[in-house]
Amino acid sequence: MDGFLDETCGGVTELRVHGVSGTPPAGMLNHPHPRLVAGDGTTGFYRRWWTAGRPVSDRADVPRVRRREAYAWGGLTSGGRTIALWLLLLPFSLANLSYFMLPRPRGGDRLRHATEAAQRLFALLLTGTLVGAVTRSCVDLVGWQCTAAGRSCTDEFAPEWLRWMGEMWAYEPSKRLAVTSLAPLLVVVLLWWIARRTWRRDERKVVPTPEPAQGPAEDPGDGSGGDAGDDLEGGSGGERGAARERLLLERARLWHGGAPVWRLRVVHVGFAIASIGLAVAAPFAGTPLGLSLTWANAGVELAAAVLVVLPWTGRRLDPRSGAREPAWLRVACHTLRVAAPLVFVVTFWAAMGGLPQSAEGLMLPGVGAGQVQFALMLGLGAFILAATWVLARMDGPCRDPLDRPAMGGLAAWFMLMVAAGSANVLALGVPFWTATFFGVPGTPDEPGPLGRKLFIDDPVWWTAALVPLLAVAFGGVAVALWLIRRAETRRLAPELTEHYGERGGPAVARKWALAALTDRAGLVLGVLTGIGVAGFAVVTVISQLRLYTPTAGFAGLLASIGSWATAATVVGLALLGRRTYGSSRLRRTVGIVWDVSTFWPRAIHPLAPPCYTERVMPELMARVGRLAATDRDTVVLSGHSQGSVIAAALVLQLDPVMRGRVRLLTHGSPLRRLYAPFFPAYFGGDGLPAVREAVAWRNLYRLSDPIGGPAFRRVDPLAAEPGRGNTVDRFCWDPLRPAPGDPLPEARWHSGYWLDPPYHDELARLITPSLPPDRTVR
């Protein structure tokens, strides 16, 4: 091709890794003509193509001497059209986040393993919650109620594609239930297909094997653990070496989830299919055949629940060790994989053949499976809360406030409750929308003729009544944050007036105060979750004791508002998904959610959006190995925002020889501000100091940045206790301080670090360590 493109690998390479929202290669390289030199359209490495030929500037690429390269991974979270379907999987992703927030104190292995098993079972019940909502809407509201004789789906105004069922089988409910069960089955198949597709693409990637001289591989463990970051025994080299071996981010198996994700997917899909079959068979449990089918489906559900709590089901193995899971586990998973669809097919054909009706009711009769799952979720939630509290106390008090975990170490439980809450909002919206579309939502206790009423049980109405109360709580928290920002603005304004003048000081103070609200994330999460859990406990007691009816008085008003709000939420997500499917720009915007939440592997929920790091990590390791093949070569990993998290985790995956050839430059980094407090077992404690010891590291931060911050202690002039001896962090003024008489420049907030002079200063110092340090830019 015409022009100039450096395709060599020797010398110094500045390898830029973008953060959230998938910054295009042209933006990362600050060059209008990026060219792919490795990888593909989903993830790839790009360099600058100079259309006018070889350039001569100081920052131009020079073959075998220096170059700038960008790694674009945004296609994993915002490139595919199936991201439109991920919006409904947010509860599953939050459940995975809660797993990695769990404290991991020494001496607490048994309690932690029990807590992780409870988390996996809770995640399985989340699958049951969402699939159960679709099953309730289709099998109960449509199959049992709406298409029965004389009901709303049999009149002349009903849609033709549904009325035929009532006309043919108005008095044969088993056939109606069989046909309507195909809709939730299709949802499960779609979830399975998406999860399998991303699993084959990402999680089957293997971390590159190190050279033999780099030391022994990790001990695969004794089989007692069952998680992605289980403690390992073995190793020598003194106390410091033992401490370093315990770092979870150093373990290759953390990013090697092909086998455990497959096992968990088999368990979740089997459980979901069996729950649909149980809904079809349970109304006919009074007959011998119906009872047999009911027990068969319930047995599959029980087998899935037993498998999910076994430690080996979710356990990850070091890909370098050659170890494999037990043969019995593979046999059990394959058996469940066959049994679940087989039992469903038998149930379907038996129902289509006509099962004699043995139970009647306004709503679909059952065998109490829903109540059992509800009670089990309550018990698991209470156990996980108690166990997490004990694990957090075993960690002991933090001597350094810098290492204090978020929310007193209970962030894992709070995040799991948020996952349950979001799942319930979706689970409420589906039946309410269905009942509204085909008829009128009602409760079984309402008097009068059936008419177009489709009945939803009281606990669902009571839970819907919580939605407007939570909306009020959101408003109250928003007002509190506004007051906090205003107070912080008043505090900062006098100090910033010295640097920005009388007019610029208050304006900058408002920007910095807004960015500082991120530090209240734990408080906001705790308050809203606490209100939601307390409200749920109250309505559960009211519902179980039947103290009030959910459709009368003020409670009825709240329930009605909540029912419309949840239905509107589902419709809104569907419309957003449709727009996302056709708009690449909107996919990048929505992809921000997945950039943050899918950094971590699918440790407990396999149907969540995929972990991009399990593909990114092997690709970056292989690329760094190629770019820094000899001791004369240097790679400067430049990570912005979420890219800094990827780069820090990558550094700890490299062997000691390769670390000596790598430098780290982070900017807008959430490592200390968000990851260390919320994921203390991975980035807190010895995690970030280990990165500092492994490679030469510089970090740029601004006080206008709502996401990034210092990696250690603040070094800016406004810090209460400036970090002395902090050689990693450098403060950058934003906006830049204007010259006398000039207007205040625009603030860059979280973006544009690559364009700042301090970036190039620190890049030069990493390449040439003899240059004098400078901790702030004036």
Image: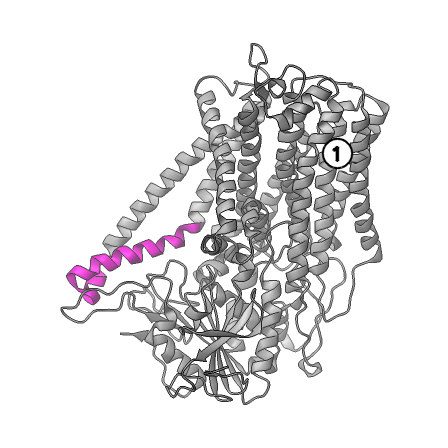
Residue projecting furthest to the top: 448
Name the one closer to the observer, 55 or 289: 55
Look at mark 1 in the image and give the residue it sits on.
Answer: 277
Q: Residue at x 80, y 46 (%)?
A: 336
Q: Residue at x 74, y 30 (%)?
A: 178
Where residue 758 sits: x, y (%)?
A: 34, 75
Q: Which residues are magenta?
A: 492-521
Q: Quadrant of the C terminus?
A: bottom left
Q: Is residue 46 magenta?
A: no
The answer to whether 153 is drawn above or below residue 503 in the figure is: above
Task: Examine the image and state in which quarter residue 416 appears.
Answer: top right
Name the one closer to the observer, 55 or 570: 55
Any part of residue 108 in sight: no
Q: Residue at x 56, y 33 (%)?
A: 430
Prevailing secondary structure of the magenta residues: helix
Where residue 236 sits: x, y (%)?
A: 68, 76
Where residue 53 sits: x, y (%)?
A: 42, 85
Characterize the local packing of mark 1: few (<14), some (14-19) or many (20 or more) Cα atoms within 10 angstroms: many
Q: Is residue 404 left or right of residue 338?
A: left
Q: Secondary structure at mark 1?
A: helix
Name the one closer to the observer, 96 or 338: 338
Q: Amino acid at mark 1?
A: Gly
Task: Examine the image and state in which quarter residue 769 appears.
Answer: bottom left
Q: Residue at x 65, y 52 (%)?
A: 195
Q: Is residue 412 left or right of residue 492?
A: right
Name the one closer to the observer, 142 or 525: 142
Where residue 91 sits: x, y (%)?
A: 56, 45
